Image (cartoon, rainbow, N blue to C red):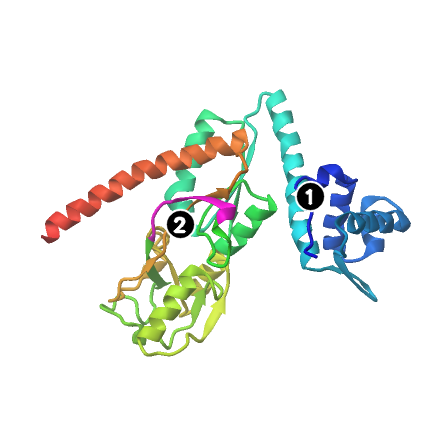
Amino acid sequence: MAYRLAEEWFLRSRLKLRHLRLLVTLDEQRNLHRAAEEMGIAQPAASKLLAEIEDILRLPLFERHPRGLSPNVQGEMLIRSAKVVLRTLVQAGEEIAAFSNGDAGTVTVGTVMAPMVELLVEAIDRVRKTHPSLRITVELDVSDMLANRLLEGAIDFSLARIPHDMELAQFEYQELWGENIHFLCREGHPLAGRKDLTFRDLAACVWVLQPRGTPLRQVIERAYLSAGLGALENVINSTSAVMAMVMVDRSDAITAMEKQVAKLLSGVGRFRILDLKQDMCLEPYGLLRLSGRPLSPGARILYDAIADIAATQRVSRQAACVGKSLIDS
């Protein structure tokens, strides 16, 4: 017989918030004794709570080991949802307190590098003028990590790409645009100032790049293969743009970044954009949020500001494309 749960099983069962808190704490501690200490309860009480959860669901959620516990697949599913529920309640309390005190609330936004430079900074500056009490937190990371943070309820929305291995129905997505990729080196690099470089010219360089699987890395790896150079080697993997720029500044390493980010960094006088013969473009990013989850008032303020600025920039980009087409024709 197929396993089934009633549509509103959590209402009909004895499931309580302390059950959800135990799941999250067990995931963090991976040990029942430490989880009980973290929650301020006795270990037998924690064992009883876990037994109650597994009895409600009629299946085990953790694998037992000599030194502790680890969640199985079903356990990971419920833990992920438990984190969202608990975070949402914390955020609700913060919003109520903020509104009661006359504040605009809070927002946590995730972003990849390019939209931070192109959109987010301008949006924050605009919002700070109209809602100075809005508390804003920015998380910079790669799209995969930001999507997971979104699913966990740790961020309100993000400026990123939907990872290809994730279910699209989980998200609401407003696509914006992609960017050309530029390659950066230090001033004085042996390749700085050379014209019409190819990937063969870059083959001997040390690269500082985002980890495998990220959109930017995939574009470069495909270009390497297309150039007949085989797999990309001699790479230092880092999600940190600061780490990449320090390595580039202090060695002959090179890195790749979106056009607007590269132009910003090259303008400080320490870095040069390499003149690569081949144009390369990164797939579009967009405004990403969870489907069916309303934005908090504070998050809505920043989200709308970004969307408004993006709409204005889109008109400018389209006008620039038309102008370029007329010149080329």
Residue placed under numbered mark 1 in the picture? 6
Q: Nearer the observer, disc 1 or disc 2?
A: 1
Residue flagged by tag 2: what amino acid is it?
Tyr
Image coordinates of residue 135 in percent, x first then y, are: 55, 33
- The answer to whether any part of residue 249 appears in the image is yes
Residue sitting nearer the eye, 151 or 231 = 151
Measured from the top left, where is residue 231 in percent x and y? 41, 76
At 44% from the left edge and 27% from the top edge, which residue is drawn? 129
Q: Quadrant of residue 91?
A: top right
Q: Secondary structure at mark 1?
A: loop
Say which of 133 and 55 sits in front: 55
Residue 128, compared with residue 162, is above or below; it is: above
Badge count: 2
Q: Give the residues drawn in magenta, as a range.
A: 169-178
Three-letter amino acid code of the residue under disc 1: Ala
Q: Is 19 in the magenta?
A: no
Classify 116 as above or below 126.
Answer: below
Q: Local crowd at mark 2 within 10 Å, few (<14), some, or many (≥20)?
A: many
Q: Nearer the viewer, residue 284 or 203?
A: 284
Q: Is residue 65 left or right of residue 314?
A: right
| Relative to 55, 274 lies left or right | left
Which residue carries the number 2 mark?
A: 285
Q: Looking at the image, which residue sits at the far left?
A: 329
When asked about the image quadrant of residue 228, the answer is bottom left
